[in-house]
Amino acid sequence: MATPIDPARLAQALGGEARGDKVCAPGPGHSPSDRSLTVWVDRDAPDGFRVHSHAGDDPIACKDHVRRLAGLPAFEAKGRAPRNTIDVQAALRAVVARQQQDAAPAAKAHIVKAYDYRDADGELLYQVCRLEPKTFRQRRPDGKGDWIWSIGEEKRVPYRLGELLKYPDASVFLCEGEKDADRVDDAGREKAAAAAAALHGTAKSIRVVRLPNLPDKGDVSDWLDADSGNAARLVEVCLAAPLWTPAEPAKPHDTQRTFIKSSADFIAALAPPEYVVVGVLVRRFLYSLTGQTGSGKTCVTLRLAASTALGETFAGKETKRCRVLYAAAENPEDVRMRWIALAPHMGFDPAEIRVYFTEGRFKISDSATKLRAEAEALGGEFGLVIIDTGPAFFEGDDENNRPQMGAHALLMRSLIDIIPGGPAVVVNCHPVKNATADNLLPAGGGTFLNEVDGNLTCAKNDSLTELHWQGKFRGAEFAAMSFLIKTVTHQDLKDSDGRLLPTVICEHIGEQAREEIAEAGRQDENAILALIEDDPRASFNRLAQKAGWKLYSGEPNKMKAKRCVDSLKRAKLIKETRAGRRVLTKEGKKALEGDDE
């Protein structure tokens, strides 16, 4: 009986490399640098080996390919020679000997291009040569100024290893061959599901890119040749592609995949969440923050940005200190004023804190490369990105169009990969039309909501806003967080005549403070009840004057009076007559007399 196949000799015969009992090698018809074919040495299998093609090549063709290169007899449908009559090792030794004796290519063939493979120190290990007529050959220096036309047992390395090592956190584009890799240079695409499967668990994220209008059997070089403008679009096309996950349907002939796992293997795959705000925000998750205009979204997210950058608690919850990017798109001047005013209240220096801003609107799909480069130049490793607001970055033409809103959500999610560090992304959103406090879902309905990992909400009641969630939240339940919205001034915020300008910030309040504020609100409502009983026709302006409620400007705070009146009406403590008079109900009179307990 023949001895088992030696994986090292088999790898040499196939032009690949051995990894234990497994050989990774070029599949039939693939380039020498390809590693889509896996061969397992298995003495119980026919011919002593099993095969699997990650590129979806026919398994029979792959077996014939291995037999031919290894010098084994071809398969015969009506029987084959008994296994003990085949000296596999002898056949392999003969193949390797022939390879080592190979001379240079025939005279009629000439080298069109030689691709250098170098180690981490830049030392040339070997070359892959493209010849004309078209074929590929490998060679390595013989140390005497000439070449040996095989790689032998030389260490295999990725093409352009030095550049990969120079930028450890950069995006890597896997191409069909060396020519395509050189063409795309700083921009390119992942090859296909085979490469994605091989990189899953190592790469932070993977995208499989299908170039638009690419001809059948075309590659990235064909696409770049077709239109001079394609080179500028390549990175944007790649980053717009959806994230690849191993949940994609298995390919035909995927015989090596294991579907059923043991309990131990199943739980071993658990990836613990990497929190930004413990129990609330997780890195690489996309969140919407939905609230009506004026509900305090900007106040809350600015405090969130400062808290995480400082590593301080946010609403009583621990944060993981990190860099923060804040996209002030809707009203940069307002954000600037609030940020200046927030600094002394939280005790940070705006010139030193690790919060960075973009200003105004721009097209993310056209700016992805520049955004990433600028973020990397600042040190990368951003843990949080805040978009204020999402609609400012909408690239469609109809916010009621479901596919466009789905694409908008995916664009927001792409920031997780555009900004280095795998940050959590929080997108301030407007709610659906006519939304109430218990229906704060982001505009775009289910199409947008389906694409986010959680929908946070801001609901305001007078000077309090409550941060919670509705509709969807991937993670543990958390209690609502209350923030007091405060009007403040700062010595650096003045108009052109030197007058102080008011702005608003928020601060977290605990349960006791919330109860005290609620009690103060009840006292305010009681005051309005008494004023209405005295003057049923009083306007909001007059009610505010009589209650002594003033704005920062000194004018009566008629909006506060209106909120109190609306609250009393909802509680059915007052009602309005057809003549426009407000009168106390029976319950209202009891409340005024203190008998409503």
Image (cartoon, helix red, strand yellow):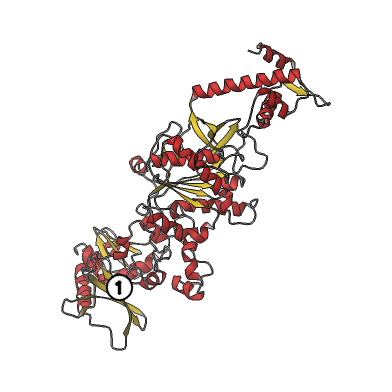
Please identify the residue farthest to the right as the structure is shown: 579
Residue nearer the viewer, 403 or 534: 534
Left or right relative to 15: residue 289? right
Could you tell me residue 418's position as x and y percent? 44, 55
Residue nearer the viewer, 66 or 462: 462
**Visible in this render: residue 5?**
no
488 versus 204 height, above or below = above
Q: Amino acid at mark 1?
A: Arg
> Which of the 4 quarters of the picture holds residue 136?
bottom left
Q: Quadrant of the N terminus?
A: bottom left
- Label 1: few (<14), some (14–19) or many (≥20) C-alpha neighbours in 10 Å: some
Could you tell me residue 334's position as x and y percent? 55, 45
Left or right relative to 193: residue 103? left
304 versus 181 height, above or below = above
438 versus 388 height, above or below = above
Please identify the residue farthest to the bottom as the structure is shown: 108
Q: Quadrant of the C terminus?
A: top right
**Visible in this render: residue 49?**
yes
> Which of the 4 quarters of the picture holds residue 350?
top left
Left or right relative to 257: residue 213? right
Could you tell me residue 174's position as x and y percent? 39, 64
Residue pointed to by mark 1: 68
322 versus 533 height, above or below = below
What kind of element bears circle 1? helix
Could you tell me residue 85's position as x and y percent? 22, 68
Residue nearer the viewer, 72 or 572: 572
Image point (62%, 20%), residue name? 522
Residue nearer the viewer, 539 or 311: 539
Please identify the residue farthest to the front as the structure is shown: 497
